Image: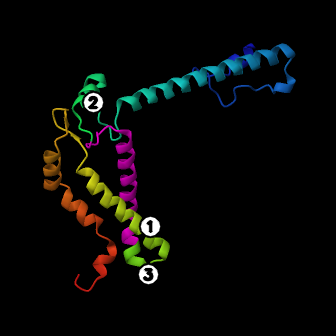
Amino acid sequence: MSPDNQELLSEDGDSDTEFQIPFGLLSTEEKQDRLMYLWKKTIKRAYGASQIVMKLKHIKEKILLFGIPREDSKRNNLIETITPKCIIKPDDPIKQYWTLYISILLIYSVIFVPVKVSFYDESSMNMIIWDFIVDASFATDIVLTFFSGYERKDQTIETDKRVIATQYLKMWFWIDVLSTLPVGIFELPFF
């Protein structure tokens, strides 16, 4: 690299005015030096970006959907050996995608249902169908929760159906049922 280009660089190698001499005015050797420098800089940045991507991939493998750390193979082997067929594992990818889907529907409901109730007098057929899909998804989630194992405080997975049902009925079931009721039901005369 030519000396006039090197003195323009900051300590980290970046500068807004990195090259003050236009490329067309350089000699052939200076053009080659500049291109070589730019290629090396590009390769370093691409390598750095790939390292970040690999680190994120590693982190993704270590973390469940909502940030619960996994305990490598020992815990996974324990889950494999004691989980009955009809129980959904908490770290099952399909369960994680389902949870994400339900979370998105919850965000939609929290934002749009109050707006709809406040400002729209009548719903279109498309809105009625969409509301039915949302309500059916929430109802399906209630049923699936009775078959979903969960992680206890001691980091073991609860797979006993009775315990799962009891815990769900004690805590979230009633809230889920109330939130699953269609909004239109509150427009009936007895409410």
Please say if the residues under marks 2 and 3 sit with CB atoms less than 8 Å apart: no
Q: What residue appears at the point 35 percent right and 33 percent down from the top-left corner?
A: 63
Residue hosting label 3: 122
Q: Position of residue 137 (x, y in %)?
A: 36, 59
- Give the amino acid at mark 2: Glu
Is 92 above or below relative to 109?
Answer: above
Q: What residue appears at the point 20 percent right and 58 percent down from the top-left corner?
A: 173
User: Horizontal placement of 182 versus 126: left or right?
Assistant: left
User: Mark 1: which secondary structure?
Assistant: helix
Check residue 110 for magenta coloring.
Answer: yes
User: Horizontal placement of 137 versus 17: left or right?
Assistant: left
Bounds of the magenta segment: 86-115
Can you tell which of label 3 and label 1 is closer to the viewer? 1
**Can you see residue 19?**
yes
Q: Position of residue 79 (x, y in %)?
A: 25, 31
**Can you see residue 112?**
no
Residue hosting label 2: 80
Residue hosting label 1: 130
